[in-house]
Amino acid sequence: MTLTPGGSTAAADPPRIDALTTAARRERLPVGAWHWKLTALVGIGAFYEYFEVFLGGVLAAVLGPLWQLSTFEKASLIGSVFLGMFVGALTLGRVADRVGRKKMFLINLSIYLAFSLLAAFSPNVWFLIACRFVAGIGGGAEAALIPTYLGEFIPRHRRGRYIGYAFTIAFVAYPIVALIGAPLAGAHFLIDGWRWLLVLGASGIVVLLWMRRNLPESPRWLVSVNRTADADAELRKIEDEVRARTGADLPAPDYTALPPEIDEQQKAKVADLFRGNTRNAMIAVGALWTIGVLAYYGFSSLAPVLLVDKGYDITKSLLYTAVIAVGYPLGALTAAIIAEKLERRTLAVGTALATAAAGLVFDYGSGDAVITGAGFALGFASNIHSSCTNMYASEVFPTRLRSTAIGLCYGSGRLFALLMPFLGLTILDAFGGSTVLLLSAILFIITAALVWIFGPKTTGRSLEEIAEATPTQP
């Protein structure tokens, strides 16, 4: 069989489509407008997922005095979305490995849209909690699928950068929530201001659903379920679009740069994730998305409440939170820029330690400038770390189990995040904000140690090389 530089096969030969040819044809695509478009469509979906997450702390701070909420009710309001994300990532992540990436993107957003809108008309706190739980199911499945999907399209030397760009878009949600949360906290126009926050969270989903209708299915996933003809059709459409955008022929695929033997069509078994070196990858990514997430949300979701504990009123607390929140998208953007220059395991470890240090300064510092500066540094470092985590998770698992593995780790992280408001607010009430931040710092240090010990190196390597280096069999 002859494979031409344009990616098509000679007329006399049947198409040769397997994991190797799929990877080689994808890797030779020049990174440009097509990849930017894909990243933006995925990143906007992540924006709404993080909007929902960060909204929890604002709702708890605003509705606490308005509805006379108990500590348990405030914790439930924050934690409900995390419980939903746990369910969504754990169940729908597995479904994405069965029915495909594109179909799950549409299902995820539809769930989120319906229940975010319904939440805006909540008559009481428990109805609101129930709606946020179901909306979280869609949001959790969406977030777990993002690194899976982008990791299967972006060439290896730009994979980390473009996943970083997607999460830069996502983390813009935090300063927006904080900025609009402050003026809307006491506003009323037809409905209460906090209800408008929920409406805004769902408003762009209808447009995004329409924009995503033409997303390509992952050829890697199609090959992994033995739909080789469909994989070839998707690759041809992508190649034709890139060719049209660049106005030039594509270079010939380089098969020598990839491992010669890849068997992605063998039956996917969850038990394979806990065998051989892949078990080490599960420990590393699991630590990032469980212990690390508990530490991360110990600050980000409770930031308005922690500032109130330091003596600021709710309006000033939300305004300071907005200033601190600017560090979130800037951190994600910095991660995107440096992603291919540093080994991702090293970056994940270093930023976990830097976040712990910034948290301690925020904890024990005094004065507006010190507190906001340390808070900004904490948000900046923690979101380099968070973006790096998403890059890293997209790389260390085989295609046939990638969404399942990420869903399992991400879902477990959201279960840990669910514990955070109950533990955090209880500790806050009993011992003060200093203890909450000290515990978050300790958890970041533990995360850094586990990733350094068990995590494989990934930067600049193809997914096939990494999958071969972390086999699912001992």
Image (cartoon, rainbow, N blue to C red):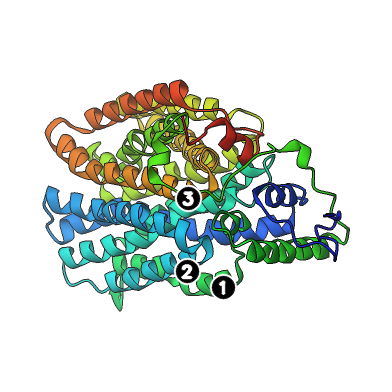
Image quarter for residue 410?
Answer: top left
Please determine whether, in this image, residue 145 is positioned above or below residue 345. Answer: below
Q: Amino acid at mark 3?
A: Lys
Q: Going by the picture, which residue comes out furthest to the bottom?
A: 190
- Residue on which disc 1 sits: 213
Please determine whether, in this image, residue 89 is positioned above or below residue 360. Answer: below
> Does any portion of residue 335 appear in the rendered image?
yes
Q: Amino acid at mark 1?
A: Arg
- Expressed as whole percent of the image width and height from the top left, the position of residue 161 reads 63, 42
- Expressed as whole percent of the image width and height from the top left, the position of residue 12 reads 85, 64
Please determine whether, in this image, residue 352 is positioned above or below residue 53. Answer: above
Q: Nearer the viewer, residue 373 or 278?
A: 278
Residue 267 is tagged as: 3
> Does any portion of residue 200 appear in the rendered image?
no
Q: Amino acid at mark 2?
A: Leu
Residue 239 relative to residue 249: left or right: left
Residue 245 relative to residue 65: left or right: right
- Expressed as whole percent of the image width and height from the top left, the position of residue 27 reads 72, 47
Which of the marked residues, 2 or 1, is nearer the chain's N terminus? 2
Which residue is pictured at 61% across the width and 41% down the height? 463
Density class for disc 3 (Cα within 10 Å; few <14, some 14-19, many ≥20) is few
Q: Nearer the viewer, residue 253 or 139?
A: 253
Which residue is pictured at 44% across the width and 71% down the height? 203
Residue 451 relative to residue 244: left or right: left
Which residue is pictured at 34% across the width and 66% down the height? 198
Please determine whether, in this image, residue 363 is positioned above or below residue 148. Answer: above
Q: Nearer the viewer, residue 174 or 33?
A: 33
Residue 345 is tagged as: none
- Residue on which disc 2 sits: 106
Which of the marked residues, 2 or 3, is nearer the chain's N terminus? 2
Q: CA distance from mark 3 to mark 1?
A: 29 Å
